[in-house]
Image (tube, grey):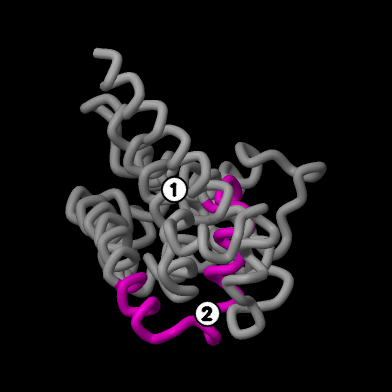
Amino acid sequence: MARNRVVKRKQSKADISRDKVLAAAVQVFSEKGYAGATMREVARVAGLSAGSLYYYFSSKELMMEAVINVSINNVSKTVLNAIAVQPPSASYSEKIKVAIKAHLQGILSSGANAVISRYLWVQIPDEVKRKHFIAQSAYEEFWLNLLIAAQEAGEIRTDLDVRLTRTIMLSAINAALDWYRPDGKSVDEIAETFFKIIKEGIVISGESDGPALTAPEAKKEATALK
C-alpha cells in the first residue's frame, strides 16, 4: 500500500508539472506565435531546464497539439456532460439550448488555449491540424445528430440545411472569444439571447403587411381564396 501511495504521489506531481509546462507553452505561443516560440523559451517560463522539458514533450509540434486538445476536449466534455444530465422528457429544443450554453462556457473557460486554436491556425503544422480535425469532427457530429433529431421530431424547420445550420451556430458562439468581457453580460444572458435568436429570429413576421393573422383568420382567408 505504501508503494501505491508513492506511485500516486509521483503521478500527481507529473500531472501538475505537465500542466505547468502547458501553461508556459500557452504563454509563449500567445506572445510569439507558433513559428517564433522555442522549446528553450517554454522551459524558461516553466522554470525547467531545456532537457527536463523533453520528458513531457519531445517536440514543439506535440506541445501545440496538447494545447489545442485542452480546448476541444474541454468544450466537448462540458457540452456532453450537460446533455447527459437532462431528463428523458427534455425536448430537442431544450437540449439545443443547454448545448449552446455549455459550448459557450467551454470555450470561455478554455481561455488562451481556445484563442490559440483560433488565431494561430495558419501557423500550425499540417499533421497537428489533421489530428485536430479528427477530434473536432467527432464533436461536430454530435451537433449534427442533435439537429437532425430535432428536425425529424418537428422541432426545427425541415427546409434548413442542418450541416450549414450547425456551422453557422458554432461559428457564432465561437466568436464570443473576440468580444466577451467578464464585466459585461453573463454567460447565462448571452446564451439566452443567442437561443432566442435561433428559436425566434430577429425579424417580426408580417411586419410590413400589418399584424399577423390568427389561425382562424388565416383559415378563413385561405378558404375565401379558393
- 149 and 54: which one is in front? 54
Question: Badge 1: few (under 14), some or many (20 or more) residues near its Cα, within 10 Å?
Answer: some
- Secondary structure beneath disc 2? helix
Q: Main secondary structure of the magenta part?
A: helix
The image's mark for residue 121 is 2
Q: Distance between the residues labelled 2 and 1?
A: 18 Å
On screen, residue 26 versus residue 57, left or right, reads right
What's drawn in magenta, residue-wise?
107-133
Amino acid type, callout 1: Asn
- Secondary structure beneath disc 1? helix
Task: Name the residue carrying label 1.
Answer: 74
User: In the image, what residue occupies the spot 64% across and 46% down?
Assistant: 190
On screen, residue 195 versus residue 176, left or right, reads left
Give whichever of discs 2 and 1 has the lower sequence position: 1
- 219 and 62: which one is in front? 62
Amino acid type, callout 2: Trp
Magenta run includes residue 36: no
